[in-house]
Amino acid sequence: MRFLRFMSTPMGRTIRVVMGVSLVVAGVLFGGVGGWALAGFGLLPLVTGAAGVCPISPLVGEPFRGGSRCGAPTTSIHR
């Protein structure tokens, strides 16, 4: 699935982290039960993006952790 492959790339991971931080900040600012629920939900994309994992990927046959199979660029350099 192209979307999950994109989310395994460094750009996709960055987007997830930024979205997670935004949700946490918005939830804390709103306060109340709904705000704290939003902040708690924001931890999911924040943590999974920072760790480089995708809990949805195994449901569609992709690996749990991003890598070259998911379309993420490899970073090894051989000279």
Image: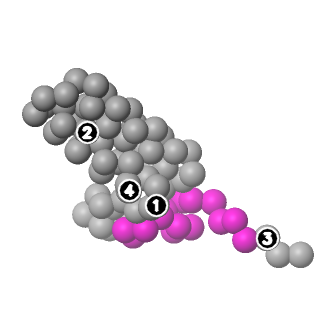
Task: Give percent across and percent down for residue 4.
Answer: 40, 52
Could you tell me which residue is drawn at 30 percent across and 42 percent down? Answer: 42
Residue 77 - label: 3
**Residue at x 54% of width, y 53% of height:** 9
Which residue is denoted by mark 1 in the rendering? 52
Instruction: Tell whether label 4 touches label 3 (CB within 8 Å).
Output: no
Q: Looking at the image, is mark 3 or mark 4 nearer the viewer?
A: 4
Residue 55 image offset from top left, x and y in percent: 30, 61
* Tag 4 secondary structure: helix
How far is mark 3 from mark 4, CA to CA? 26 Å
Q: Residue 27: in sight, yes or no?
A: yes
| Residue most extreme to the top | 30
Q: Are marks 2 and 1 in contact (CB under 8 Å)?
A: no
**Number of other residues with Cα within 10 Å of mark 2, as a class: few under 14, some 14 to 19, many 20 or more:** many
Q: At numbered mark 1, what does the secondary structure look like: helix, strand or loop?
A: loop
Q: Nearer the viewer, mark 2 or mark 4?
A: 2
Tell whether position 17 is magenta.
no
- Give the answer, above or below, for where 31 lies relative to 2: above
Eye-nearest disc, 2 or 3: 2
Label located before the other in sequence (2 or 3): 2
